[in-house]
Image (cartoon, rainbow, N blue to C red):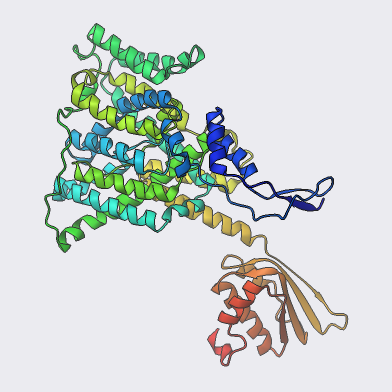
Amino acid sequence: MASLRCVHFRRLRPDADAARADRRGGSDCTGRRRAGRRAGFVLPLPKAGLRAAGRPTTAQPRRPTLNPSNYQQQWFGTPGRDLIAGTVVALALIPEAIAFSIIAGVDPKVGLYASFCIAVVIAFAGGRSGMISAATGAMALLMVTLVKEHGLQYLFAATLLTGVIQIVAGSLKLGDLMRFVARSVVIGFVNALAILIFLAQLPEFKGQGWLMYACVAGGLAIIYGLPRLTKAVPSALVCIVVLTGLSVGLGWGERDLLRTVGDMGALPSALPMFQLPDVPFTWETLRIILPYSLPLAVVGLLESLMTATIVDDYTDTGSDKNRECAGQGVANLAAGLFGGMAGCAMIGQTVINVKSGGRGRLSTLWAGAFLLFLIVMLGDWVARIPMAALVAVMIMVSIGTFSWASLRNIPVYPKSATFVTFATVAIVVGTHNLALGVGAGVLLSALCFAAKIARLLHVTSHCSADGAERIYHVRGQLFFASTTAFAAAFDFREPVRKVTLDVTHAHFWDTTSINALDKIVIKYRQAGVAVELIGLNTASKAIVERLAIYDKEGAGEAV
């Protein structure tokens, strides 16, 4: 293998370079790559034919896309597309917010006000541009019992506490825990949500005639056919406009031939007002709302961080997960103070936004602001939008969200990854509990990883020429999953005077591995065999010296 040398590039301002790249029309990711090449990053290059240019510097990690110097790009990089995408999202949010309000057992305006507040606030406070947050079904399911047993005001109080918990989570940088979520879990999460989005549309067909099916089919034809002709306008918006025009012009809604948004529930006609929850500020109130606020905070953060990860991959840009945690908290505080319920990121509406060209924070802000404008100023017109149009849009979201490549790649993917993906999908779809599904997926992926690493442990041995000493060579990771195989590799009945354990290529990780070492050494010594341990690396030596007891008095009775 060719030896490597480091080439040091002249250090400029990477953020300024990235901004210049953006102004030239390059993508944000391209700008960052160009900036990185100018920022003094160390690149390993073949030694042959190269000459070092100055002293090498330490390699710098990739910066997230969302940094203050790029703030203008986040807001006004693509304003036209952001406004159009936000318009489509606002129209799609209305029936969703009403439906989730009904699930939670509250007035539709609670979900609509929440969607407005959360979308507007997260546009400023969130860590991922182009992502849509509002009232969601996953959160609504957790509120049912609270509303039924204690009333709406306690829901507002629980929403405020949810926001506080999420802000604390962001301050503690718990967003960094997303790196422990395996790709197979993310794929399972995405596929499960796609299935749930599709299943949520099926009740709209119940009791409907052929016209509903024809309109949905026509809407899907527009959504998938229009981009072949032009991409100037999002096909989802054209679908909504065309089907609404036909429904209004032909009187389908008035003759009850098609369900409309107005059939979902009454739209509010007033602006949301600031109000504190009408509950006593006592420990008893905290005891009531905390068991609901904790799972709300966890589910909200999980769905938001997973959605951010998906958008990161889709757009090839980065996000600030810790800022997103805190931003969700601030948004829920605003929702609770303006008569809304807790919410989080919505993968369905986020996919609509991204596929419609929305990339900046302006798309999220406009989605929330235009939502409020629609329900307050144009409520009568919005109520006449046929549900068939929105069902077609959501089916498009479901199809676009599902990772079809995960099915095609089953023959080549590791069986453990496929198992984790299908388990995550099954649990999420079966329970409608995103936190449970993702938690189970993370646990299963960790167990599969541990089992795979444990199988890499190898113990070989050879005997000295005189037959008096047995030397064992250990390779691999010694931890709870590999200690059984480690202990089984030794022959305690062999008639030797000395045993040498060479662990040069091994590493001790936990108390279980140290306990196994203690048992092996003590068992040999009790049989009169001398034991020598050699080759400990620095970290293993530290944990052995701190935890091992085989050299301590009374070790034989302790293990």
For residue 525, above or below residue 340: below
Q: Where is the C terminus found, in terms of image quarters?
A: bottom right
Quarter of the image where one finds residue 32: top right
* Residue 557 on image: x %, y %: 55, 89
Q: Position of residue 416 (x, y in %)?
A: 57, 49
Residue name at image x 72 percent, y 55 percent: 55
Which residue ends up furthest to the bottom in the rendered image? 553
Q: Going by the picture, which residue comes out furthest to the top?
A: 250
- Residue at x 47%, y 28% (from the top left corner): 400
Residue that lies at the very extreme toward the right in this rendered image: 465
Q: Position of residue 179 (x, y in %)?
A: 51, 52
- Check the image and report above or below for 151 versus 470: above
Q: Which residue is located at x 42 percent, y 46 percent?
A: 305
The answer to which of 540 and 218 lies nearer the viewer is: 540
Left or right of 50 on screen, residue 485 = left
Q: Quadrant of residue 139?
A: top left
Residue 140: give x, y in percent of width and height: 27, 42
**Does residue 327 appear in this view?**
yes
Left-right relation of 62 to 220: right
Kindly indicate the quadrant of the structure image that contains residue 386.
Answer: top left
Closer to us: 106 or 60? 60
State the residue in front, 138 or 88.
Answer: 88
